[in-house]
Image: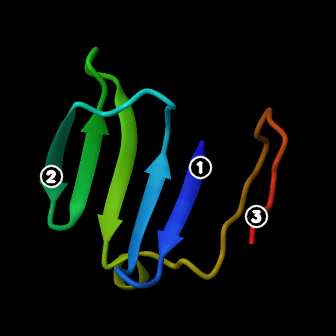
Amino acid sequence: MKINYYPDTDSLYIDLSSKPSVDSREVSDGIVLDYDEDGNLTGIDIDHASVKLNITELILSKLPAEVTQVA
């Protein structure tokens, strides 16, 4: 899973899968869910992220994975 913030567009993308998305659905104003060909969720796009979310803090807890920080 990857989380990317794009300050030039104030959007946050949560990439949940390496599979390409083939369908997108806006489920709320500025919230778009991406799906693969099997209907599985592959990503979440959040427009105006700094208004909708607290993007200054990210807390990861009890994940069974290695955490890699990329600046």
Q: Closest to the observer: 44 or 6?
A: 6
The reply, left or right, for residue 64 in relation to residue 10 is right
> Residue 50 occupies which quadrant of the picture?
bottom left
Question: Could you tell me if the residues under marks 1 and 2 are in contact, i.e. CB atoms within 8 Å?
Answer: no
Q: Which disc, if any, is residue 65?
A: none
Amino acid carrying label 2: it is: Glu
**Residue under numbered circle 2:** 26
Q: Mark 1–mark 3 contact, CB under 8 Å?
A: no
Q: Position of residue 7 (x, y in %)?
A: 46, 83
Label 3, on which residue? 70
Residue 10 at x, y = what percent?
38, 80
Q: For mark 2, does the 10 Å Cα neighbourhood hold few (<14), some (14 to 19), or many (20 or more) residues? A: few
- The Cα–Cα distance between marks 1 and 2, rounded to whole angstroms, is 20 Å
Viewer-side label of 1, 2: 1
Q: Which residue is mark 1?
A: 2
Label 3: few (<14), some (14–19) or many (≥20) C-alpha neighbours in 10 Å: few
If the image is split into quadrants, where does the N terminus sit?
top right
N-terminal-most mark, 3 or 2: 2
Callout 1 amino acid:
Lys
- Of circles 3 and 2, the one toward us is 3
Which callout, 1 or 3, points at the residue further toward the start of the chain?
1
Q: Secondary structure at mark 1?
A: strand
Placement of 41 over or under 8, stated as above or below: above
Q: Is residue 43 above or below residue 38?
A: below
Name the residue at 54% across, 62% down: 4
Q: Quadrant of the C terminus?
A: bottom right
Label 1 or label 2, whichever comes before in sequence order:
1
Are the residues tagged 3 and 2 within 8 Å (C-beta)? no
Which of the 4 image quarters holds residue 62?
top right
Name the residue type under label 3: Val
Mark 3–mark 2 Cα distance, whole angstroms, equals 29 Å
Kindly state the secondary structure of the residue where label 2 is placed. Answer: strand
